[in-house]
Image (cartoon, grey):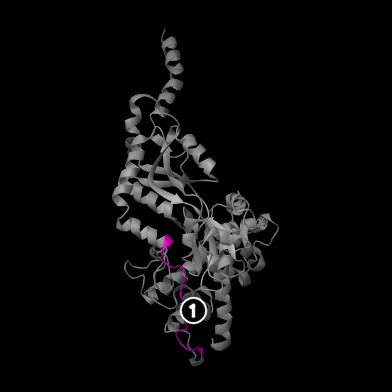
Amino acid sequence: MKRNRLSASLSLLPLLVLLLSQLAACHSRSSHEGGGEEDDLQQIKDSGELVVLTLYSSTSYFIYRGQEMGFQYELSDQFAKSLGVKLRVKTARSVSELKRKLLDGEGDLIAYTLPISKEWKDSLVYCGEEVITHQVIVQRKGGKNKPLKDVTELVGKDVYVKPGKYHRRLLNLDKELGGGIRIQAVSNDSISAEDLITQVAKGEIPYTVCDNDVARLNTTYYPNLDISLVISFDQRAAWAVRKDCPRLAEAANEWHRQNMTSPAYTASMKRYFEISKAMPHSPILSLREGKISHYDPLFKKYAPQIDWDWRLLASLAYTESNFDTTAVSWAGAKGLMQLMPATARAMGVPAGMEQNAEESVKAAVKYIGTMSRSFAKVPPEERVHFVLASYNSGIGHVLDAMALAEKYGKEKYVWRDHVENYILLKSNEEYFTDPVCKNGYFRGIETYNFVREIMSRFELYKSKIKQ
């Protein structure tokens, strides 16, 4: 009799496990029935975390110098804090995968400008800030030719686009206009939509197309861009949750309503879409006087600790801050050596001393030493390039570029013309979603130019200034 009761109890175990799993937080459930809907928000609060789903991109989510960043990421973090929970981010490879992951219960909320469509209204609740997106022509301003003001002026013009939605829109627009737009489809896998924007800014191509938010962000890198010509219909977009999380949707709507003018929200908007991301550089002292900067004694004092030429350290400082100890970058890096706050703390900079010149140099040298040890397998003559690249991007993106170089038959311990080419490709979806990449999207052209600029100026300093 006892054995029968024991067997009956054991047979109930799977049912008990199933019941317990159904009581888990909202993000662990793919469906919810009955009168429990009002508990979805409380379950998230009880779990202690909000799990958001998003895509890697320059406007949504990326990792910079080891720190999570992106406009949608920052808004998600602000929302999570308003709920009293921590934020955890999961990424997907596409919009369709975002939706699938949400409906499968892998996250609580899609934090991305998800196009609002009737097709998904039966399974999703759109919430948070509703934004209007559309495609624009990216062109230069201030040159000989005035920027185009009407779509009819595209007839007879060369417009360069990647295959996909931008190309499809141009084909449709060409039909609407009766033909004449010279659409140049760029099939080269190594060129991304943002690379085309850079080419427009540099005058290498005349026109390209992208979404207005991406275009707006790129004007902070290239102020000579004109993005005023709209070529598509408006598309409404917002965040989204599952139908079984109505309270979460209500909370997102209320948070947005109350916080869209808050200091934190405003700061995020300015950080990504208004503040210039280019550091203005101008000479501080005349090299003919035998000095590079007022901080030469500090560079000479600390450079030997990492076996660097002090003039290389000076070149790094110039590129980072223009020798301005009060400089604060768009991403929050501070001081002469532009260390991110978390890095400065980890390297021992006392709170409030981030803009002290000696503390900044001392911490930067310590940080460089740490990174140099991480590249112990890289030959000494090459290692400086990898360290400089990591200083700019964060070590994760450099490791990704090395993995890509190895995968595609290049030398992973050689920077120039090898790994540097793959840091460039980190802005291209085909490459940053490659299984060997662990850190997602990155605007690699910044790091590519950073390393080359520092090494070129170092050579100039060596030719003008004695050791």
Residue 277 magenta-drawn? yes
Reading the image, the residue beneath label 1 is: 314
| Callout 1: SS | helix
| Residue stretch in magenta | 272-287
Question: Is residue 112 in sight in this rendering?
Answer: no
Residue under the point 44% across and 46% down: 236
Residue 122 in the image, given as x and y percentages of width and height: 45, 32
Relative height, residue 305 to residue 7 (above, below)? below
Tell which of 354 and 31 is nearer to you. Answer: 31
Residue 431 in the image, given as x and y percentages of width and height: 61, 54
Question: Is residue 45 in sight in this rendering?
Answer: yes
Residue 406 in the image, given as x and y percentages of width and height: 67, 57
Tell which of 307 and 432 is nearer to you. Answer: 432
Where the C terminus falls, by quadrant? bottom right
Residue that extends furthest to the top in the rendered view of this protein: 1
Tell which of 303 and 33 is nearer to you. Answer: 33
Residue 175 in the image, given as x and y percentages of width and height: 62, 50
Residue 257 magenta-drawn? no
The type of residue carrying mark 1 is: Ala
Where the N terminus falls, by quadrant? top left
Relative height, residue 407 to residue 83 (above, below)? below
Residue that extends furthest to the bottom in the rendered view of this protein: 289
Q: Residue 399 lies in what quarter of the image?
A: bottom right
